[in-house]
Image (tube, rainbow, N blue to C red):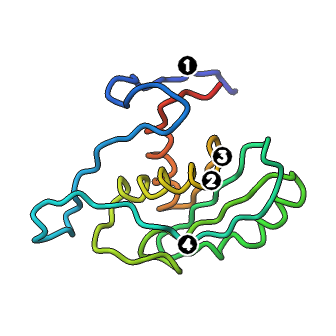
Amino acid sequence: MLRWTRAWRLPREGLGPHGPSFARVPVAPSSSSGGRGGAEPRPLPLSYRLLDGEAALPAVVFLHGLFGSKTNFNSIAKILAQQTGRRVLTVDARNHGDSPHSPDMSYEIMSQDLQDLLPQLGLVPCVVVGHSMGGKTAMLLALQRSQPPP
C-alpha cells in the first residue's frame, strides 16, 4: 500500500538573495589545491554539445558519471531533442572528456562550473539530469538555486 509523505523543504537561509539567477555560494578550496596558499578554485570553460530546440521550453542538461563524458548521452540527447523540441545540452565535467583539467576537483567547483556555463548559453531555467557523479553535481546545483520552482 502506498502512502503519501510530507515533502521536506530545506531552509533558504544562507543560499543568497532570491532572484532569477543562480546564487553564488562560496567555494571552499579542495584538498587537492595543495601549496597554492588556499586560493579559491576558479570555474573552467567546459566542453559541451548543445542540440537546438525551442528556446521557450526549459532545456534538458545531461551530466555524466565519474568515468564518463558528454558522449555517453549522444543517443538519448538526439532523440529527446527531436521528440520534445527542447534544447538538450551534454557537458564534459572538468577533468573529463574534452574539458580542461585542473587539480581542483570537488562537487562545489563542478557546480560552480555549471553556474557559469548555463547562463552564458541562455539555459536558465533548465532540467538537469545526472548519473552518479553528475547526479551529485546536479543535486548540489539544485540546492544552490536561489529561486524555488513554480
Closer mark to the observer between disc 1 and disc 3 = 3
How many angstroms separate mark 3 from mark 4 (CA)? 19 Å
Q: Which mark is residue 127?
A: 3
Identified by mark 3, the residue type is: Val
Q: Name the residue that disc number 4 marks.
A: 47
Mark 2 and mark 4 in contact? Answer it, CB < 8 Å.
no
Closer mark to the observer between disc 2 and disc 3 = 3
> Which quadrant of the view contains residue 52?
bottom right
Q: Which mark is residue 129?
A: 2
Residue at 38% of width from left, 56% of height from top?
A: 107
Closer mark to the observer between disc 3 and disc 4 = 4
98 or 105, which lies in front? 98
Q: Name the residue that disc number 1 marks.
A: 6
Which SS class for mark 3?
A: strand
Identified by mark 2, the residue type is: Val
> Which quadrant of the view contains residue 74?
bottom right
Q: Position of residue 108 (x, y in %)?
A: 35, 53
Residue at 56% of width from left, 66% of height from top?
A: 64
